[in-house]
Image (spheres, rainbow, N blue to C red):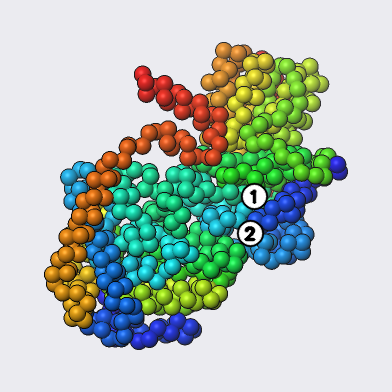
Amino acid sequence: MAERTVVEAVNDALTLEMARDDRVLVFGEDVGVTGGVFRATEGLFTKYGKERVIDTPLSEGVIAGAAIGLAIAGWVPVAEIQFLGFAHNGFNQFVDQLARVRYRSAGRFSAQVTVRAPYGGGVRAPELHSDGFEAHFAHAPGLKVVAPSTPHDAKGLLLASIRDPDPVLYLEPLRGYRQVKGDVPDGDYVVELGKARIAREGTDVTLVAWSAAVQVALQAADDAQAQGISVEVIDLRTLVPLDVGTLTSSVTKTGRAVVVHEAPLTAGFGAEVVATIQEEAFFSLQAPVRRVASPDVPYPVQMLEEQYLPNAERVLQAIIATTRD
Amino acid sequence: MKEAARAAPANLDGVSSASMPPLVRYLDQDGELLEDQPMSDEMALEGYRVMLRGRRFDERCVSLQRQGRMVTLAPGIGQEAATVGAAMALDSDTDWFVPQYRELAGQLWHGYPLKLAFLWHVGHPIAFQVPGDLKMLPFQAAIAGQLPQAVGLAWGLRLKRDSGVVLAVFGDGGTSQGDFHEAANLAGVMKAPVIFLCQNNGWAISTTIEQQTASETLAQKAIAYGFPGIQCDGNDLFAVYATVREAVARARDGKGPTLVEAVTYRLGLHTTADDPSRYEPREMHELWVDRDPLRRMQRHLISREIVDRAALDRIEDEVKEELRVAWDEAQKEPAPDPSFYFAQVHRDTSPRLRRDLERFDRNRRG
């Protein structure tokens, strides 16, 4: 057990899995000698060599597409997309092709492929490097979407993703990459896909978040506690498959819910969470379910980021409002 | 359309500038050999038989579609030499065939069953379940979408020290897609054992080759990616076979990819939803009817006395009978149950999807 950041936990998982399974290939832009722009793949090139840790051309479509072919050839590809928004350059290969390998071939082929991508904002990255596009991918049947918030989960969920027989988009929280530290077991363990985590127990309001927004939610829950409101925070960990059971039982208990995400409001994944809550726990609800999201405005450049992203104060206001509804 | 030059020996390693080698050709329009026949007489006859099977299959399917018994389909009429010739250069035990959707004749050579081909055109999902250990990816309707996958597959084979190579087929329209350029670029960098077979049939629906690209040839696009590109007469079974055979040898030898542009012509429709009379000049069509690859092979087989006219008629009857049997079998295939698609999303169906299926079943029972 050691204290690690999220990016170190990712590196831990990759190092461990490449040693355990010699079919695992790591490739993407700058993942080799440099160890990735965020150093997530640091040390892998030296340990596992140029045939297993491969710098590719700057070409997201063929990174995803080649991963399909490599998987069919018997490899276990773990590709890195440098920033999630760049995946849109090859969107067809992600959502029409990678997501559907098993389906299109009626089970003849499958794609045990993991695509890692940092996403979300708050680190003063250049324009077009910070978007919260998880909903674009959650809407593609066949693709699993994983979004850890802690170092412990980052390692366990990445190991589970790489071993999953189907394609997984594994989203890494840009804002949580180095800011969030936590204990990470040294050895091998998995965190099962499709299981949410109760990040904090509470009785009055359920707060639902994933990825970097979990830290915002926890801060808001602390602030609410100071005002006498007991908030339960659910870290979804996996968007697809969604842990409907954990959501339902929490909201059944509290009767109130707020969903927080970094992505813009309209058609964000929060809408899916809210719809699920009303389908499953409508008669337990004491108040409308609220959403705290970024506005329906394209992601701004650096000087406006902090005002754009949901913060603890906005979440707290939503929590207070839902208890008054 | 450029008039084809006389055949020159293919020297695939010689391409280093924009000056392209001449188009490879073995058989002239009348079926006369310009070079030594690059395969045995038996193999030539077998190639002809599969070309014919592809042609008659397409004709039968267009007719069934007109009767409302098939879905929209894209016949490969006129392009049989290009796809069968290329497939003949592969070893089906080790090599992969990665199709777009207009190369069924070549797929039949590689081992794809006729019955499944019929099921493809009635919209049965089982047609996409490439059978057994046949080394073939499913049909691909996204233009050039298969190319990145073919390169990954080839790269993966090379990393495994597997001797297999990959034939990836696409069309002239595909060369305008980013997927083509990204795939070709990566293939060059990785020295992936892949043969890009571009069937230049002159049309992408109604878009002409001049509207598609200002490049003089499609083959020359390979130069930018650091590997050879070569044009061959795509209506000449021997030219395609010999060109692809050399590309296969290069790939197997670790020398990387080759782009082969097979110059051919779409004698049929883009799909059964298309009406070429709106855009295709009549004289252009007639010019290419004269260059029909099947007729060219028939003339060759007879003039070389590999077969006589009666034997060709017998083959025609045999193919007709094969198609009848396969279509009968296809019609006996049970319709797919909707639960089929729920089962193919992931290996382990998620609880949410399982519940969806249960609801779906309840609704169905009423």
* Residue of label 2: A28
Pick the front one: B171 or A312: B171
* Quadrant hosting residue B292: bottom left
Pick the front one: A177 or A249: A249
Kind of residue sitting beneath label 1: Arg
Residues at discs 2 and 1 both on one chain:
yes
Q: Residue at x 72, y 27 (%)?
A: A198
Tell me the element at label 2.
strand
Q: Can you see residue A21?
A: yes
In the image, farthest residue toward the right: A2
Mark 2 and mark 1 lie on one chain; the one further toward the N terminus is 2
Depicted B303 relative to depicted A122: above or below? below
In the image, farthest residue toward the left: B310
* Residue of label 1: A116
Label 2 and label 1: CA atoms lie apart by 10 Å
Kind of residue sitting beneath label 2: Gly
Q: Residue at x 69, y 19 (%)?
A: A205
x and y percentages locating residue A224 in the rendered image: 76, 22
x and y percentages locating residue B22 in the rendered image: 36, 84
x and y percentages locating residue B199 in the rendered image: 34, 67
Q: Residue at x 46, y 28 (%)?
A: B357
Q: Quadrant of the C terminus of chain B?
A: top left
Q: Residues within 10 Å of mark 1 (few under 14, many from 20)?
A: many
* Quadrant hosting residue A212: top right
Q: Residues within 10 Å of mark 2 (few under 14, many from 20)?
A: many
The reply to whether callout 2 and callout 1 are in contact (CB within 8 Å) is yes
Depicted A1 relative to depicted B130: above or below? above
* Quadrant hosting residue B332: top left
Pick the front one: B301 or B248: B301
